[in-house]
Structures are given as structure tokens and as C-alpha cells.
């Protein structure tokens, strides 16, 4: 149990003690500023403490590109070690108890042991993800030309079976949702009959939906390109919405921020899915060009805020059934994955708290009065407010670190892992 020793309560107290006085000063200053706007800082701390982000196990290994993967020392080599690292992120941020796992990358022989291992670290398995975008060792049929939408019924059956197995694993681990993303699509015009391929996908999804455990939700993740470069079967939110509706109430759309073309208005897609009762959750990340899988909020932090503006608006107005899953899905190619996940979860919390600062009555009045300049100013006032002291206070009160990345670096966690986990060249965690 390395992270408990390394990131013990005593360690955390020591790391925090040197910077708790300046934090208090910053808090007082911010509380005064917010009070002038009629906002209660304590209320925001409570909201920040309640906000949770789900961490993907596959984000703990070093990712890669089509060209190369540069491993880092001490990378986790199996699901238990990945959970250990998730435990480190959770200990420092206190915002990430939920974990999303990828099957078969996270296969374990004893699921009871895995579940207990997670619980012992303050973690729980929130969701499962299937993988029919690559061939698994020993599987009889190939996914080279598709999986759930393959022209061959036997391949489709194999892909459905894999998803049913994921549902069983999820049940044993206590998961609440299952996400399906497929790599199915065409590289060349003419390769696929668009309508027939979608019909086949939907048939396969119906078989999966029928097996969905009673309290689980099924998330459909669309993506406009890659690995297929010309067309994909579940290409956009409209197709996703159509399929989710055909499937039933517990089938919902999942929005991965990187799965849209550049300049697409993702916040409006989010609003539409909320309005139609079909927003299941997110895979947060950031991008400049496509599915870059960069850290959330690193390139377009204002877009992240605008997405949370829609989410908080729905939360505050009590949209029925509104309960999206806030998951990260990133590939950390050049950073320490633990640091990237810490920073990203903070970015999400920041956007969430800032969205709560939007003066919604004023905004509604400016919208009614057709005053675009003041409407934007209202959003910008919230977005430019530095809520870092609120986020740090929330972490501190929950037993985490005021400055999680500095604490992580000073803990020597990575150095220790380098010794405990001799490199394993076969390790395949991450998107490679
Ligand atoms: C995909 C997609 C999926 C993730 C894989 C690894 O691009 O984002 O969510 O499971 O990558
Ligand atoms: Mn994703
Ligand atoms: Mn992706």
C-alpha cells in the first residue's frame, strides 16, 4: 500500500502547514469580494467539496501517438497498480473517488479482490468500457473491418458477447454505467453502406441494452473520425441521440470533447442533449485539432467553462433526470500521468465553481433585452474570478493537499514506484 505510506495524513499535514496561512488570507479576500456580489463563499466551498470527477485507469500509463510511446519510470503494470495510482490522485485531490475501467486492459482474475482493493483506497469502480477496436489475444474473429456493425454476423455476435461480459464484470464490481465506443467506420468512400452499417450497429446495441442490469446506464460515445479516416458509424451527437432514443430510457449519449471537428460548438451540443433528456456524461479532455486527448482546460479553458455553464444552469433549474457522469479521458504522452490527472480534475472543479458564480438572473435579463455585450460580460465576470482559494480550501477540509502537484512532487511517489515497479516493456496501458 505505497500511496498510504507515502501520502499519509501526517505527510499531508506537513505539506499543508507551510501554506495554510497565506491560503486563509486569500480566502478572506475572496470572501469579501464575493460578498459584495451577494455570493456566499462558504456555499461555494461546499459545492466544490461535493463535486466529483471520474478517473480513467488507462490514463495512468504513458500514452503515445501513432509514432512512438515514451514510457516513464514506475508506470503501473496491471490494474492493481493503476488503482494504486488512482488512489494517489484521490488522496491529494479528494475529488476523484470514482474510477472508469477498460476491459480487457483491466481484467482481473478475482473481481472481489479488485473491488476490495479499490474500496481500501477510498475508490470505487464507477463504470466499465468495452474494447472492440482492437483484437484481443486468442479471439477467433478479427475487428479489422468493424465490430458491432461488421458485415459478418459472427463478428457482431463476438463483439456483443464481449460487451455482455463487461456488463457482468461491472455488476460484480458495483459499476453504475457501461460505455461503448467502437472504432467501426470506413477509410474510403464506398467502403461502407452508411445506412446498413448503422442498422447493424443498432441491432447489436439492442442486444447489449437488453442485458443491461436494472440500475445501470448505457453510454453511447460518438466520434467523427479515427481510426476510420473517411467515415465512422456513430459519427456525431445527432446519430448518438437517435440511437439512444431507439434503445430506451437508460441509453444515453456520452460527449467526449475531442470527438468533434475543430470549432464545433460543443457547449450547444451539451445544451441540446440536456434538453432532450439524453446527456449521459462526458469524457473530458482538450484539443487543438481532433482527438488530441490533451489535459482538460489546457487549450480552450473558456470552452470548458461554457460547457459547465450549461451544466450548472441545468443543475440549478432542476432539469428532471439530469445526472451526468463527469469522466476524464486523456492520453498523457509527455507529462507524468498522475500530475496531469490532478491538474485536470482541478480544472473541472474550477469550471464548475466558476459556473456557479454566473449571475443567472442578470444573464436572463440581458438575454431578454437583447444586450449581447452585457450577456457576455456577465459570463466573463464569473470566468475571470480566481476561485483557486475555494478549491484549495475544499481539498484541505476533505483531507487533501492545498497544492497537490507540489505535494506529489515532494512525496517522492514516482521515485518509489520506479523502484517497486521495474519497467515492463509489454505494458500496454494507455492509448498506443
Ligand atoms: C477513444 C475513445 C474511448 C477510449 C479509447 C481508448 O478515442 O475516446 O473513450 O475508450 O479512445
Ligand atoms: Mn473517450
Ligand atoms: Mn477519444
Image: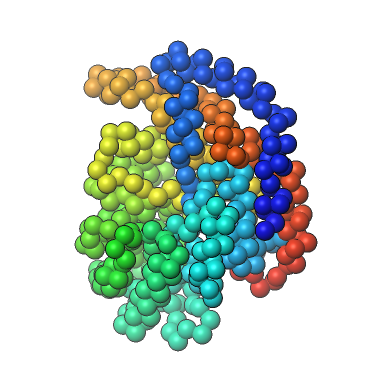
Identify which residue is drawn at 42% across, 20% down: 39
Q: Where is residue 97 in the image (x, y as percent from the top left)?
A: 51, 50
Residue at position x 67%, y 23% in the image: 21
User: Which one is in front, 273 or 423?
Assistant: 423
Q: Quadrant of the N terminus?
A: bottom right
Work out whether residue 147 can be spotted.
Answer: no
- Its colouring scheme is rainbow
Residue drawn at x 62%, y 58% is 84
Q: Is 382 left or right of 235, judged from the image as shown?
A: right
Which percent across, then down, holds residue 242?
24, 58
Task: Report the number of discs.
Answer: 0
Asked where in the image residue 401 lies, by quadrant, the reply is: top right
Q: Is residue 75 left or right of residue 378?
A: right
The one nearer the camera, 40 or 59, is 40
Q: Could one spot residue 8 in this view of the protein?
A: yes
Residue at the extreme top: 36
Position of the C terminus by quadrant = bottom right
Percent of width and height locating residue 339? 64, 47
Of 292 and 360, nearer the camera is 360
Left or right for 240, reference 84:
left
**Relative to 428, residue 124 above or below:** above
On the rendered structure, is 177 left or right of 389? left
Q: In this view, does 112 lie above or below 153?
A: above
Find the residue positioned furthest to the bottom: 140
Question: In x, y percent, where is residue 337?
Answer: 63, 53
Q: Which residue is drawn at 44% across and 21% down?
A: 40
Amino acid at each position: 500500500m505505497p500511496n498510504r505510506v507515502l501520502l499519509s495524513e501526517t505527510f499531508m499535514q506537513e505539506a499543508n502547514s507551510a501554506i495554510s496561512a497565506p491560503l486563509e488570507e486569500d480566502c478572506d479576500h475572496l470572501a469579501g469580494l464575493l460578498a459584495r456580489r451577494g455570493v456566499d463563499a462558504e456555499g461555494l466551498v461546499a459545492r466544490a467539496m461535493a463535486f466529483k470527477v471520474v478517473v480513467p485507469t488507462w490514463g495512468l500509463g504513458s500514452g503515445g501517438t501513432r509514432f512512438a510511446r515514451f514510457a516513464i519510470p514506475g508506470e503501473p503494470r496491471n490494474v492493481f497498480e493503476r488503482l494504486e495510482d488512482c488512489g494517489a490522485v484521490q488522496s491529494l485531490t479528494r475529488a476523484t473517488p470514482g474510477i472508469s475501467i477498460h476491459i480487457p486492459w483491466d481484467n482481473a482474475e478475482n473481481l472481489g479482490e479488485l473491488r476490495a482493493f479499490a474500496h481500501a483506497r477510498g475508490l470505487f469502480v464507477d463504470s466499465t468500457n468495452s474494447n472492440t477496436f482492437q483484437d484481443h489475444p486468442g479471439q477467433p474473429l478479427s475487428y479489422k473491418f468493424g465490430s458491432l456493425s461488421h458485415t459478418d454476423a459472427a463478428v457482431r455476435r463476438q463483439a456483443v458477447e464481449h460487451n455482455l461480459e463487461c456488463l457482468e464484470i461491472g455488476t460484480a464490481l458495483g459499476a453504475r454505467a457501461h460505455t461503448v465506443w467502437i472504432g467501426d467506420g470506413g477509410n474510403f468512400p464506398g467502403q461502407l453502406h452508411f445506412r446498413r452499417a448503422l442498422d447493424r450497429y443498432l441491432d447489436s446495441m439492442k442486444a447489449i441494452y437488453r442485458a443491461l442490469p436494472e440500475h445501470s446506464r448505457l453510454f453511447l460515445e460518438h466520434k467523427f473520425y479515427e481510426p476510420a479516416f473517411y467515415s465512422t458509424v456513430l459519427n456525431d451527437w445527432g446519430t448518438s441521440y437517435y440511437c439512444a432514443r431507439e434503445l430506451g430510457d437508460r441509453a444515453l449519449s456520452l460527449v467526449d470533447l475531442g470527438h468533434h471537428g475543430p470549432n464545433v460548438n460543443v457547449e450547444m451540443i451539451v445544451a441540446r442533449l440536456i434538453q432532450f433528456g439524453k446527456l449521459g456524461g462526458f469524457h473530458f479532455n482538450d484539443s487543438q485539432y481532433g482527438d488530441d486527448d490533451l489535459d482538460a482546460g489546457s487549450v480552450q479553458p473558456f470552452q470548458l467553462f461554457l460547457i459547465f455553464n450549461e451544466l450548472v444552469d441545468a443543475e440549478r433549474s432542476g432539469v428532471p433526470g439530469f445526472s451526468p457522469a463527469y469522466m476524464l479521458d486523456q492520453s498523457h504522452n509527455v507529462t507524468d500521468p498522475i500530475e496531469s490527472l490532478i491538474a485536470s480534475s482541478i480544472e473541472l472543479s474550477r469550471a464548475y465553481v466558476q459556473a456557479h458564480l454566473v449571475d443567472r438572473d442578470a444573464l436572463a435579463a440581458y438575454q431578454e433585452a437583447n444586450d449581447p455585450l452585457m450577456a457576455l460580460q456577465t459570463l466573463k465576470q464569473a470566468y475571470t474570478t480566481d476561485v483557486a482559494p475555494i478549491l484549495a480550501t475544499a481539498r484541505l477540509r476533505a483531507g487533501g493537499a492545498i497544492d497537490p502537484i507540489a505535494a506529489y512532487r515532494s512525496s517522492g511517489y514516482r521515485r518509489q514506484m520506479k523502484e517497486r515497479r521495474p519497467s515492463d516493456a509489454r505494458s500496454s496501458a494507455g492509448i498506443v
